[in-house]
């Protein structure tokens, strides 16, 4: 049902990486519940701009849940209350009139705040550059159907490859661990024959880089799986550990 | 006249002959060359990775926080290739033929044939990278028929094919970054192209985090910055998609070809209110099992379930008995608009038509429909709160893909030597209408298998060492950028970027959208400069230019879109014929279909910038069809 909401937002504001941040309160009034969460922020920002104030900075791009750019911790949960949904796909019908909504960046030591709700997730790129690929060069691939893959493995691989690199798993984990992200990539490639050849070095190099970047360890809280907008399973972490141990003993 | 430099020889041998005669840079010399790639979508990422593997020094720039976020990631349906794995008669020629015909005979034969030719290599490459394509129980690759194609040539990774292909190209790129061969510059926006003595020599970028302006020089610049559909304000493109890189290049001398070819995708979720910030596409594969209808009566506000069969108009099935609900995108979109203009649209706004699965669910069972489209039904429910299994979905067309772009020759080089343009940013392969699952094919074809050869030919001839930024042209370009920024910040007017943007979008959608005519286009050419005039006087952008200022970023992008909008309208006015997605109401068949005018418009319109207040100069590239007969498209 169409409804207009009046909300109070408690939003983390921080000028830049080196400044101290803090919460500020804003009124969001007459919010159409058909809006997405980000559209609600657009409305608030438009009002702030009109008042000559700086709008709330937040990252976003595709607004259809696939680019992984957006994300904030809403009422203590990365991407907000609805399971398997990115912030841009969360709609205001999941909130009630007069709610107070707390909005914070995806916090982690390895994700420094850049401004307001925006964090620096470049650590993820560096982890992937350490081994998240198959070392095949353009032009040398044989006919695609010479590499057959059991349907079961192809499906499991796709489940893991669905990761959008948003960082919710890190922000949701009490240890700020990146193991679901890393495990996802290791499973995606390791479940395919073309990815097996480098599986051990891949696991060792990516895990090493992950530790260097300041992410924490896994203590089986399963929070990452719970907040993942693409519902990646913690079994990917087990697969990562298997390849890592094999790679470490060799 | 522009010279496309298409190699001589029979169509099927042209690419081979080109490669045979192309110059190559010898191996140890490659590292002496510097190449800049702007954009990290399918085209940019695949090009950067491939060029680095060859040994060139590559710098890559993107506006997102990571190269993995480019909007190629949002493509759902699939990627075409002429593998003929299903044994259903596909071939390179057939893929070429379908693409030319689908583009309504407004693409270059030679380019399209090459695209079809390298399509198979793309699939091989992606599988080797670990792209998890859908597979049969046998373990072999699965194919489906897509977008009305008569053969099953589309490879897919669930409804996330763009994501998986992009992650493949990104992994190839990160492999090169990891070994220190490519340097990536995320959150950097290209704001100027630097041209010295008519040759592209570098770019000026702004670090959006710090506001720092810097120059980068190279022996060649590759633009892979995507299309310009953001000009409509509401589109299926990501919020950071914009026209700035190619528009800046255009203002520095690169020709802009066929900007009026804009694809409006038929199966998108309708607008829900004024707050709408973007439109979401649902894969057109839905039309395989969904039936499109509206009430027969104007203003019928009953719930869909209360409308009996004989009071429903399944208008695509009655108007196009052969193709029915599977008519191409442009035809489906135009018909939805007509129906809604008649007042028979549904939903709160009246700007929607039903896409009904009740029949298919009754016939095949809910489980089958769930298996085929489960993720799309979930997405629909997530956005609208409505269950597509229980009541018909509502859909409406939305701006989706730009077939036009910077003019390039057969080697993907613009008329400015040293400036290459690939993927959606160029104009070359889709003619006046792009077929489903062909955008991914083109982006990767350009980046993996075409550009690495053609850029080598150019570099070998041009020589190396032009990578210093001490030329006065760089300082000048930097100053131009700083002035533009200051101009925006100094205004302190009353209207926000979003207000101006909506205003522009409305004019573009109403006057230059799905159906165009001389009167409305002329009106657009009057209205756009009016909006721009006010935009230059009454804009309100808070904050400064020396830190992370998203309002400033948006204002700079909008300024370029405002200028570009006029060129789009002008091109649409010039092209008096209807072709593909460009529908001029003055040029239709008695049955209301697009009527081409091959006598006068079998060409590419390439525009040269002459100043904002001056008319651009038109350069016409005639199109010749030697291997395929010009025919009227008919889907009746």
Image (cartoon, coloured by chain):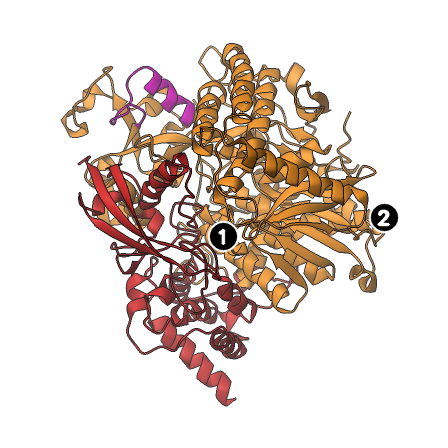
Chain colours: A red, B orange
Residue B379 pos. (x, y %): 31, 45
- Residue tagged by mark 1? B69
Q: Where B83 sits versus B568, above or below?
A: below
Residue that appears at 44% across and 51% down = A67
Q: Which mark is residue B461?
A: 2
Residue B339 drawn in magenta: yes
Q: Where B119 sits versus B271, above or below?
A: below
Residue that appears at 23% across and 15% down = B297
Q: Quadrant of residue B268?
A: top left
| Tag in front: 1 or 2 | 1
Nearest to the observer: residue A107 or residue B269:
A107
Label 1: state its secondary structure.
helix
Bin the neighbour count of mark 2 within 10 Å (Cα to Cα): few under 14, some 14-19, many 20 and up: few
Residue A181 pos. (x, y %): 42, 67
Nearest to the observer: residue B567 or residue B168:
B567
Q: Which residues are magenta?
A: B333-352
Q: Which mark is residue A180?
A: none
Quarter of the picture holding the C terminus of chain B: top left
Q: Quadrant of residue A32?
A: top left
Residue B79 drawn in magenta: no
Q: How many marks?
A: 2
Residue B113 pos. (x, y %): 65, 39
Of marks 1 and 2, which one's residue comes earlier in the chain? 1
Label 2: state its secondary structure.
helix
Quarter of the picture holding the N terminus of chain B: top right
């Amino acid at each position: 049902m169409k409804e207009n909401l009046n909300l109070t937002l408690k939003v983390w504001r921080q000028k830049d990486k080196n400044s101290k941040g803090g919460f500020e309160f804003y009124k969001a009034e007459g919010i159409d519940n058909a809006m997405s969460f980000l559209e609600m922020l657009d409305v608030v920002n438009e009002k702030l701009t009109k008042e000559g104030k700086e709008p709330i900075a937040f990252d976003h791009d595709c607004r259809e849940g696939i680019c992984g750019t957006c994300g904030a911790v809403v009422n203590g949960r990365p991407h907000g209350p609805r399971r398997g949904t990115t912030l841009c796909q969360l709609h205001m019908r999941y909130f009630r009139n007069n709610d107070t909504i707390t909005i914070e960046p995806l916090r982690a030591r390895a994700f420094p705040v850049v401004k307001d709700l925006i964090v620096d997730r470049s650590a993820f790129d560096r982890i992937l550059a350490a081994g998240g690929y198959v070392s095949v060069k353009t032009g040398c691939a044989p006919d695609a159907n010479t590499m057959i893959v059991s349907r079961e493995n192809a499906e499991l691989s796709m489940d893991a490859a669905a990761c959008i690199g948003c960082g919710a798993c890190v922000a949701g984990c009490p240890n700020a661990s990146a193991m679901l992200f890393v495990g996802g990539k290791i499973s995606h490639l390791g479940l395919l024959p073309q990815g097996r050849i480098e599986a051990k070095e891949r696991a060792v190099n990516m895990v090493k880089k992950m530790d260097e970047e300041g992410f924490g360890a896994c203590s089986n809280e399963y929070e990452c799986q719970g907040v993942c907008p693409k519902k990646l399973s913690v079994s990917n972490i087990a697969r990562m550990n298997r390849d890592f141990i094999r790679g470490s003993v060799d | 006249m522009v010279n496309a430099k298409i190699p001589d020889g029979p169509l099927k041998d042209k690419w081979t002959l080109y490669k045979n005669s192309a110059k190559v840079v010898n191996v140890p010399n490659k590292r002496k060359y510097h190449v800049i790639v702007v954009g990290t979508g399918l085209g940019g990422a695949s090009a950067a990775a491939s060029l680095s593997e060859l040994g060139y020094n590559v710098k890559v720039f993107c506006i997102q926080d990571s190269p993995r976020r480019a909007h190629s990631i949002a493509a759902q349906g699939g990627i075409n290739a002429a593998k003929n794995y299903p044994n259903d008669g596909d071939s390179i020629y057939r893929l070429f033929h379908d693409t030319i015909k689908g583009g309504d005979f407004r693409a270059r034969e030679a380019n399209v044939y090459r695209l079809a030719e390298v399509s198979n290599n793309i699939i091989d490459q992606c599988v080797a990278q670990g792209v998890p394509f859908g597979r049969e129980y046998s373990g072999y690759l699965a194919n489906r028929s897509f977008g009305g194609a008569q053969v099953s040539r589309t490879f897919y990774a669930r409804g996330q094919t763009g994501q998986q292909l992009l992650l493949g190209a990104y992994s190839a790129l990160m492999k090169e970054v990891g070994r220190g061969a490519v340097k990536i510059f995320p959150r950097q926006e290209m704001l100027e192209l630097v041209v010295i003595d008519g040759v592209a020599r570098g770019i000026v970028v702004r670090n959006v985090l710090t506001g720092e302006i810097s120059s980068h020089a190279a022996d060649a610049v590759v633009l892979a910055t995507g299309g310009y559909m953001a000009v409509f304000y509401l589109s299926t493109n990501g919020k950071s998609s914009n026209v700035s890189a190619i528009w800046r290049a255009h203002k520095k001398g690169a020709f802009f070809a066929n900007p009026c070819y804009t694809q409006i995708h038929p199966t998108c979720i309708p607008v829900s209110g004024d707050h709408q910030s973007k439109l979401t596409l649902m894969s057109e594969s839905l039309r395989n099992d969904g039936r499109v209808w509206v009430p027969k009566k104007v203003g019928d506000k009953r719930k869909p379930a209360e409308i009996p069969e004989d009071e429903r108009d399944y208008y695509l099935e009655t108007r196009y008995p052969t193709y029915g609900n599977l008519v191409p995108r442009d035809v489906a979109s135009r018909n939805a608009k007509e129906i809604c203009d008649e007042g028979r649209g549904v939903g709160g706004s009246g700007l929607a038509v039903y896409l009904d699965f009740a029949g298919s669910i009754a016939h095949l069972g809910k489980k089958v429909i769930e298996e085929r489209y489960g993720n799309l039904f979930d997405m629909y429910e997530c956005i609208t709160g409505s269950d597509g299994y229980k009541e018909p979905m509502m859909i409406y067309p939305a701006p989706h893909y730009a077939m036009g772009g910077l003019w390039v020759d057969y080697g993907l080089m613009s008329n400015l030597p040293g400036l290459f343009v690939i993927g959606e940013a160029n104009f070359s392969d889709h003619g006046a209408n792009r077929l489903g699952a062909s955008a991914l094919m083109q982006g990767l074809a350009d980046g993996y298998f075409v550009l690495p050869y053609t850029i080598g030919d150019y570099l070998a001839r041009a020589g190396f060492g032009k990578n210093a930024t001490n030329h006065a042209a760089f300082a000048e370009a930097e100053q131009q950028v700083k002035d533009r920024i200051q101009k925006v910040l100094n205004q302190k007017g009353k209207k926000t970027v979003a207000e101006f943007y909506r205003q522009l979008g409305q004019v573009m959608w109403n006057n230059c959208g799905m159906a165009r005519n001389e009167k409305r286009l002329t009106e657009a050419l009057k209205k756009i400069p009016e909006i721009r005039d006010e935009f230059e006087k009454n804009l309100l952008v808070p904050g400064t230019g020396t830190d992370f200022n998203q309002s400033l970023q948006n204002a700079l992008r909008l300024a370029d879109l405002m200028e570009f909008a006029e060129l789009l309208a002008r091109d649409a006015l010039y092209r008096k014929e209807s072709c593909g997605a460009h529908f001029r109401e003055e040029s239709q068949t008695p049955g209301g279909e697009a009527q081409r005018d091959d006598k006068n418009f079998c060409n590419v319109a390439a525009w040269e910038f002459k100043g904002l207040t001056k008319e651009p100069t038109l350069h016409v590239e005639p199109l010749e069809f030697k291997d395929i007969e010009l025919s009227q498209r008919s889907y009746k």
